[in-house]
Amino acid sequence: MDEIIAALGGQQAELSGLLVGLDESGWQRPSPCEGWTVADVVLHLAQTNELAIGSARGRFAEALEGLAAGLGPVRDSDHGAARMVARERGGPPSAVRDRWQTGADELHQLLRTTDPHTRVVWVAGELSIHTLATTRLAETWIHTGDVAEGLGTDLVPTDRLRHIARLAWRTLPYAFERAGRALTGPVAFELRGPTGDPWDFVPAEEPLTVIRGDGVELCLVAARRALPGDTTLRGEGPDAEAVLELVRTYA
């Protein structure tokens, strides 16, 4: 758990560094998230951090009600997130930045001091504090990349992504269930990290499907920021194509 918390803190710091001194035109630049500016992306992260704080405190329903009250029915989590951003966009960039930073700091401290085995409610269902922390790492990394791309800044991948790749591997059953499909059997990932280190995630049983390639690319595919066919990722086994199609790191 300490490694996850440290990785989350490092990821939050990377985003904070992008926002320091950002002028109004920078906040209003378009991001890769369709229809969202850089400010919208940061607002979304602030909102989801507030949901995570509510979750860790056992008050997820109350936190969600506070953000979504009056929005009416939504099709899915993406639709709900878009409507929450639309309702609150337009505030001063400094307020958006401060809201995100305050929530990020509070969440980091809360996760650091909570039993990692505690079960809490989240968008995707019940999960542990340990998994909640990893999902926050994944989402913060995804949207740090969106902000960086909007600002025309290149980021250097770090070994923090190993935790995100492992999350993608562990949640494959959820990804398949969400799509109304089923895995044929166990899946292994044999990946390389940005420094060349092996990132191997192997099930207890003999895998029927193996995905091999670049770990950063796997994280980008799972984040829906890259298409499998545009990467060096390759798979063999009955579920190879479906794994690369369905793998994800968010609800």
Image: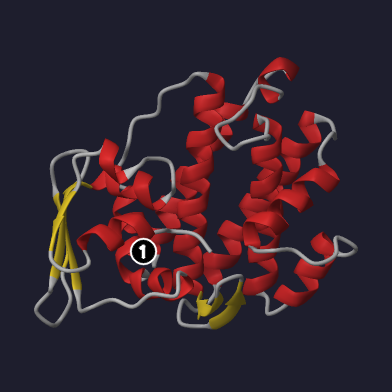
Side of 190 relative to 17 (left or right):
left
| 153 relative to 171, above or below | above
Label 1, on which residue? 167
**Residue sitting at x 51%, y 68%:** 132
Q: Quadrant of residue 52?
A: bottom right
Whether residue 199 is visible to the viewer of this picture, yes or no, is no
Whether residue 45 is visible to the viewer of this picture, yes or no, is yes
| 164 relative to 12, above or below | below
Query: Which x, y percent locates residue 61?
Result: 75, 76
Query: Which x, y percent locates residue 120?
Result: 58, 80
Query: Which x, y percent locates residue 213?
Result: 16, 47
- Depth check, front residue: 248 or 45: 248
**Residue sitting at x 85%, y 35%:** 91
Q: Secondary structure at mark 1?
A: helix
- Depth check, front residue: 115 or 130: 130
Outermost residue, left direction?
A: 206
Colour scheme of the rendered structure: secondary structure
**Residue sitting at x 40%, y 28%:** 155
Outermost residue, right direction?
A: 70
| 137 relative to 144, above or below | below
- Depth check, front residue: 194 or 236: 236
| 165 relative to 36, above or below | below
**Residue sitting at x 77%, y 68%:** 63
Q: What kind of residue is marked 1?
A: Leu
